[in-house]
Image: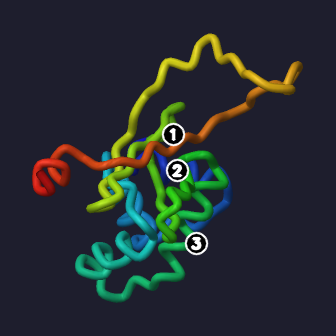
Amino acid sequence: MKTPEELVARFREQGYKVTPQRQLIFRLLNGNTAHPTAETLYEVAAEQMPGISLRTVYQTLSELSAMGEVQHIDLGSGAVRFDPNVDDHHHVVCSTCGVVHDVYVNQTPLQFEGDVEGFAVHSTRIVFSGECAQCAHLSA
């Protein structure tokens, strides 16, 4: 993800207003590896800026997603999450505690089995479900 300063410039280039609330959201996303929901970001933002609205968080995330600056990801857990890491990667999700981590999988060359000859892959999104080391240790 771009730095908060770079996002300010991108927003201005796109004709979006750059408000203190949006700048806060940019800072909260910068380096964030927790894959937060909009509600989680809102809770943290509201502690720092009590007047911020959940609508502002959703709108900013939607615009960032449309610009390709965050990934809008559905991990099958109900709530949509946002990932500021826009590199080509996948996710592992602990089915016990819900922690999410980025993973990189060597997919080259990608080969299919079945009747899909000529299919051109544009992107992949894989979610690996399992149990993280900490939860596995607790259940042992």
Q: Is residue 94 visible?
A: yes
Q: Quadrant of the N terminus?
A: top left
Q: Is residue 65 left or right of residue 7?
A: right
Give the percent coordinates (x, y) of residue 62: 60, 64
Q: Amino acid at mark 3?
A: Gln
User: What coloring was used for the rendering?
Assistant: rainbow
Looking at the rendered structure, the secondary structure element under dot 1 is: loop
Give the percent coordinates (x, y) of residue 122: 74, 31
Question: Would you name the residue on which mark 2 appears?
Answer: 70
Find the distance from the CA under tag 3 to the CA under tag 1. 19 Å
Figure quadrant of residue 138: bottom left
Q: Earlier in the sequence, mark 3 or mark 2?
A: 3
Give the percent coordinates (x, y) of residue 118: 88, 20
Which of 43 and 131 lies nearest the eye of the viewer? 131
Q: Is residue 107 left or right of residue 103?
A: right
Q: Is residue 1 visible?
A: no
Which of 123 and 62 lies nearest the eye of the viewer? 123
Q: Is residue 96 left or right of residue 133?
A: right
